[in-house]
Amino acid sequence: MTPVSRKLYTDDVSLLVVLIDTNPYFWSTNNSGLPYSKFLSHLVAFLNSILLLNQLNQVVGIATGVNSCGYIYDSSLAPPNKRAETLLQKLEEFVIKDEELSAEDSVDGIKSSLLSGSLSMALCYIQRVLRSGSLHPQPRILCLHGSPDGPGQYVAVMNSIFSAQRSMLPIDSCVIGAQHSAFLQQASHITGGIYSKPQQLDGLFQYLSTLFATDLHSRSFIQLHKSVGVDFRASCFCHKSTIDMGYICSVCLSIFCKPHKKCSTCGSTFGQPQATVSPTNLKRKAPDS
Amino acid sequence: MSERQVIKRAKYKSSIKDPGTPGVLTMKRERFVFMPSDPRSLMKLNVEFRFIIGHKFSKEAPNKKALLNLTQDKGESYIFEFDSFPDRDACRDFVAMAIAPPANAGKASSDKPSVPPSSEQLSTAEMDRRIKLLQVDSELQKLHKEFVMGGVLTEAEFWATRKKSLDEKISSKSKQRVGLKSDMIFNVKPSSDGQSNRVKYSLTPEIIHQIFAEKPAVRRAYLNLVPKKMTETDFWMKYWRAEYLHSTKNIVAAAAEAAEDEELAVFLKQDDILASEARRKIRRVDPTLDMEADEGDDYTHLPDHGLSRDVSKDLTDSQYDLYKRSFLQDLNRHAAVVLEGRSVDVELGDTRSVAEALTRLKEVESANEASNTHVEQGRSDLISRMAELEDLQGPRDHPVAPLSIKDPRDYFDSQQANAIKTLGESQSGSKHKKSILNAHEAYGSLRKSISEIKDLGLTDPIIKSEVAMKVFSELTLRISNTKYHHGKDPHESILDGLPNATKEEILHQWTSIQELLKHFWSSYPITTTYLHIKVNKVKDAMSKIYQKLQEIKSSVRQDFRHPVSLLVQPMTQALDAAFAHYEVDFQKRSTKSVERPNGFV
Ligand SMILES: [Zn+2]
Ligand SMILES: [Zn+2]
C-alpha cells in the first residue's frame, strides 16, 4: 500500500464510476425514443470524452442487472484503442450471465434493477483506487438509471448513500426512465451530486457532456442545473399519510401516527413510561420474535 | 406569597437631601403604612400599592445609604432609608411582588394553589447576574423589553427558560486553585559579587516545596538528616553546593567531591526514587503502543533545543554515569510536577511538614497502585486481544439482538412517496401497463441491441443538431429558472438579498416567535388557572406578531415579496400550529366544564 503522503493529489483528475442500468425488462418495454443500442452509443461517446478531458482520468463501468451486478469496463485495464469493443464484449458476457441467474421465466411488470448492489461495488472500487496506486483522483459516481425503484432495497441503498456521503463522494443521477427515481433524488441530494431527468432522450449525449462531464473542481465555478428541493416529509407506516409529528420506534426508526404496543416493522415491544420501569423488564426493547 | 407582611425600621424622606423622619414601615398585601417614632410628627403615610407604579433602589455598597424609592402614578415619590441593605432588600422584593401585575386578576380566591413562579425571593446577586446577561446580549434585551415590560411574560417566566445561561455565569466564577509556578529551579541563579569566590542562592518556601516535589531523594535526605545530623542551613548549603558543581558541568570534579562527602553525593547522584518510579511507570505503558507512529514527532535530534545546559561531553567512562543528569529529564520531571499541581495542603513555611506531607502522598499513591491488581489483569487481556489474529478467532457472541426488519418497503413508502409527489409528476406507476414479460425475450432483445451496435458501430452523428439545440435551450432555461428559485441552496441566503431594515425586522420577529412559542408549548397541559392566563397572554402576543408579519409582507417592494413570503411562511406555519392547538384545547376544556355540572363524569 502506498503511504498517503506520497500520493499525487490533483484537482483535475477524475475517477468516474458509471452505473449502467442493464435491466432487460426495462429496456424491452421502453418506448421513450431511446433504444438500448442508441443509449450505448451515447454512453460510449460520453465515456470517450471523459477520457479525452484528461489523460489521467479513469472511467469504470458497472452494469446494474436484475439478478447481479458486474464490472464491465475499466479504462486503466482496457487497451486504449479498443475501448468500445472491450466494453460491449464484457457487457454481452454480463447479460448472458445475468440471464442464467434468472429463476422465473416471466415477471409481472418491470422488475427493479439492483441499484444497491452496483452502488456498493462502486464504493468499494473507489476505496480501492484511493488506497492504492500513486494517484489520488477526484472520485464520483454517475447512475444512468431507468428502472423503477425497488422499495425492498431501501435499507441497502440508504446505507450506500450514507457511506458515499461519509467519504464525500457525490452521486450524480441521470434518470432515463419514465418516472422520477426517489432513491436517486435522495442520493444526489444527500451527497451533493447532480440529479437530472432529461426530456429529450435522443439528445442524451448532450445532457451527459453538459451536466455530468464537469469535474468536481470545476463545478464550483459553473452554474449547473440545481434540482428543485425535495420534500422529505415522512408519512406514517400504518396509514401512509404525511405527518408532522409522530411516534418513532427507537430500534428500527419506523414512524407511526399513533402510539403502538409493539412495532409492526421490527417486532420490538414498547415499554411503559420510565416511571414504571423495573429492573426486570429492562430488556423490553429486545425483539421478541 | 411567602410573607404576609414586612415590618422594618426606616426613615421617611420627602427628598433625597431631607435627613428623614425615623419610624416604622409596615408593608402589607395591598398597602404600606409608615408610622413616625415621634407620635407628634405629621409624616404618617398610608398608601395603597395600586397607586405605586415603580420602584428604584440604591446600589449596595459599604458607604452608601440603603434607599428605596417608590414612585406614585401621579409622579410623586416616597423615599425610605433603611438601617441595613438586607432590610431594604426585603422591602424592595415585597414591593416588587405587590406591584407586579396580579397573575390571577379578577379572581379573588387567594387560596388557590395556582402560584406563579414569581414568588421566589431574588437575591441581589441573582439580579445582578440577570442585568449583566441583558447588558451583553442585546437580542435578549430586546426580547426582555418587549415581553416582560410589555406584560406578556413575568420576569420569572422569562428567566425560567434561561436558568442554564444564568448558571453558567455562576460556575465560571468558581475559584481556581493556584498551581505551582512553571519556572524551573535552575532559574534560581546564584548571585555573585564578582570579587570573592562566594556565590549566593536565595531560598523561599515556594522553592523548597518545588525541590521536594521534584526531587524525592532530596526530600528523603532532608527527613533523614535534619535535624539529627546537620542543621537546616547546612543541609541547604550542601544542596546548593551540589547544584553549583552541577552547573559547572565538570562531572569529574563533581564525582571527586562526591566520593569524599557521602551527603553531598546524594544531591549529585541521580535520584534513585525517581528512577524506580520511572521504571514502574514504564511497566504501566500500554504494551501495544506503536512508538513508530510518533516517529515524525521525534525531536531528540535537536541538541537540547539550543540550550547548552546538558553535560554532553563525551564521558564514556561508566563510573561517571551516576552523575550525569540530562536537561530533558529535568524538564520532564518539572513538567510532571507542575501538571500534578499543588497536591499538599500544608502551610509552606514549615519545611519539615511539607516534606512529610509529600512523602505521605507518595506512599498513598504507590499503595493504591499496588492494590490495583486488576490493572495487571487488564494489561494482559489487552495484549492477548491486540495480538490475536482475527481470522483465527471463532465468532464472538455479541450481546446485541439482530435487527429484524420485516419489510424494508415500508421505509421507502414512508419517505420517498412524498419526494416523488413534489416533482409534480402524477404517479405514473398507476397507469403503468401490467405487461407480462418473458425473461427470455427480454434478455434476447437486450443481446440483440448489443450485437447491433457491435456490428454497426456508433451512430454518426451521435445527435442531430436540432436535438442538440433543443437540449441546449432546455438546460439553459432550467438554469435561469433555478437562479430565481431561492432558498434551496444553503450557500446563498435569501436574507442577504433583502434590505437591511427588512432583514433585521424579520430576524427579530423570528426570535420573538421562538420565545413565545417556547412559553406557549411549555404551558401545556393546562393544569392551573395561572397557566391558563399565561397561555392567553402569550396567544394574544402571538396574534399581534402574526399581524406584523402580514404587514411586513405587504410593505416590501414587489420584487422582494416572494423571498419574504418564503421566509415568513415557516413562521406563520409555526404560529398556525400553536393557534390550532389552542382552539382544540379550548374546545375540549369548555365541553368538559359543561359536562361536569350535569354529572356525566
Ligand atoms: Zn398512521
Ligand atoms: Zn421497530
Image: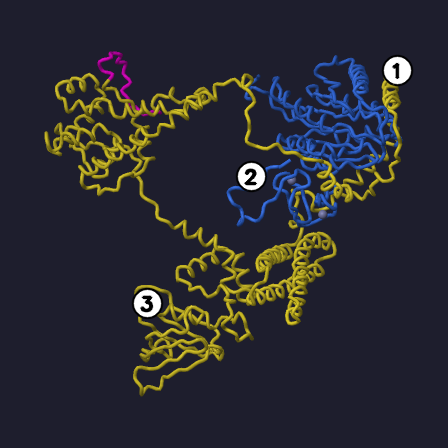
Chain colours: A blue, B yellow
Q: Is mark 2 within 8 Å of ligand 2?
A: no
Which quadrant would residue A199 be assigned to in this image? top right
The disc at residue B64 is: 3
Magenta-drawn stretch contains B130 = no
Say which residue appears at 26% left-offset and 39% top-offset: B344
The residue where tag 1 is placed is B455
Q: Is mark 1 within 8 Å of ligand 2?
A: no
Determine the chain carrying the residue at label 3. B
- Is B379 rendered above or below residue B515? above
| Residue B526 coordinates in the image, percent (x, y) | 59, 62
Callout 1, which amino acid? Asp
The disc at residue B307 is: none
The residue where tag 2 is placed is A283
State the separation of the CA atoms marked 3 and 2: 65 Å
| Residue B128 coordinates in the image, percent (x, y) | 42, 60
In this picture, which residue range is highlighted in magenta?
Answer: B305-321
Q: Nearer the viewer, mark 1 or mark 2?
A: 2
Callout 3, which amino acid? Lys
